[in-house]
Image: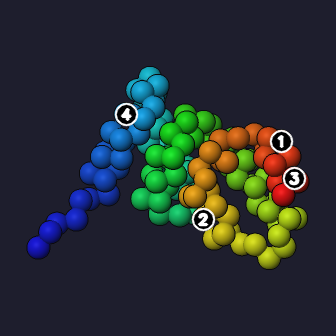
Amino acid sequence: GQQRPSLEEEGRAAARKLLKRNPKLKLRSPEVLASNLDSLVEILGIPRRKVVQVLLGQPHLLEMAPQTVAHNFACLHQTAAKVAPGIGHAQITEAVCLFPPILAMSPDTWKGKVAAL
């Protein structure tokens, strides 16, 4: 049967893809990038594979401080709850997966966009 790649191999393959899309990531230490990836998995509460998909859509997220990403994500939650009461974590992570750059934007940027909806 076909052997599934280990998480580590998957991670490395993803890292190579990310480096192609964002060569600046090479300037960061692999430890920092790995720990940022782990933080993103925790913040978003979705499987690593999905987080990698998000990063392929917005590699810059891997360079951002996890605190910043967490803050942006929390603001997204608050804003979404105001605009659409009853919206849950799953819908918000889904939105992030569909449009990764939103996580890299400063909340002030998209609060205006959301208000305009």
Give the labeled residue for mark 3.
116
Identify residue type, mark 1.
Answer: Asp
Query: Which sits earlier in the primary sequence, circle 4 or circle 3?
Result: 4
In the displayed structure, would residue 47 be above or below residue 37?
Answer: below
Instruction: Please identify the residue farthest to the front as the structure is shown.
Output: 117
In the displayed structure, does residue 26 sit left or right of residue 115? left
Q: Which quarter of the picture shows residue 12?
A: top left
Where residue 111 appears, as percent x and y from the top left, is: 84, 49
- Crowding around mark 2 (Cα neighbors within 10 Å: few <14, some 14 to 19, many 20+) is some
Which one is in front in this view, the residue at disc 4 or the one at disc 3? 3
In the displayed structure, does residue 54 sit left or right of residue 17? right
Nearer to the camera, 52 or 70: 52
Identify residue type, mark 3.
Answer: Ala
How many discs mark residues in the rendered view? Answer: 4
SS of the residue at dot 3?
A: helix
Give the labeled residue for mark 4.
20
SS of the residue at dot 4?
A: helix
Gap in angstroms between the C-alphas marked 3 and 2:
21 Å
